[in-house]
Amino acid sequence: MAGIFENELGSITISGSVISAIAGSVATKCYGVVGMAFKNTKDGIVNLLKAGNISKGIQVGFDEAGAINIDLHIIVQYGVNINAICESIIHNVRYQITSITGLQVGEVSVFVESVRVAND
């Protein structure tokens, strides 16, 4: 699906993949986030996605009113406040997508798929 702007000059279509790329970029820059996650449905193993594939850990949808709904699957560092990280991601993703695209953001859901423990 895509977000569509209509005005007197014509229409602008913003692809869901562009929105997921923006959301992934914003989420991975938040403190405590190791990266985006992708859960293999066959064996249930969670994989850390590389920078080029971060959109696999994100689902973008649009509701009847045209607002964007985003699901983010992340991996966090051990020892950080998960609630604070998720609130930060939700706020930053909502703000950046609204300011970059001009589209209304409805629901942003964050799913913590794994916690990474540092090997010291």
Image (cartoon, helix red, strand yellow):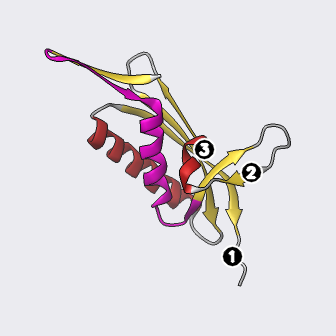
Query: What residue would you read off at disc 1?
Result: 118
The residue positioned farthest toward the front in the image shown:
52
**Quick check: is 11 in the magenta stretch?**
yes
Residue 86 horizontal/vertical position (percent):
52, 53
Badge 3 amino acid: Gly
Instruction: Tell me where residue 29 sits by quadrant.
Output: bottom left
The residue positioned farthest toward the left in the image shown:
8
Circle 1 packing at 10 Å, graded few (<14), some (14-19), many (20+), is few
Badge 1 amino acid: Ala
Q: CA distance from mark 3 to mark 1?
A: 22 Å
* Residue at 51 percent of width and 59 percent of height: 85
Q: Please say if the residues under marks 1 and 2 sit with CB atoms less than 8 Å apart.
A: no
Of label 3 and label 2, which has the lower sequence position? 2
Q: CA distance from mark 1 to mark 2?
A: 17 Å
* Residue at 54 percent of width and 51 percent of height: 52
Q: Is residue 35 above or below residue 31?
A: above
Residue 8 horizontal/vertical position (percent):
13, 14
Query: What residue would you read off at disc 2?
Result: 46
Of residues 118 and 16, the one drawn nearer to the viewer in this rendering: 16
Of residues 118 and 111, the one drawn nearer to the viewer in this rendering: 118
Circle 2 packing at 10 Å, graded few (<14), some (14-19), many (20+), is some
Of residues 86 and 33, the one drawn nearer to the viewer in this rendering: 33
Q: Please say if the residues under marks 3 and 2 sit with CB atoms less than 8 Å apart.
A: no
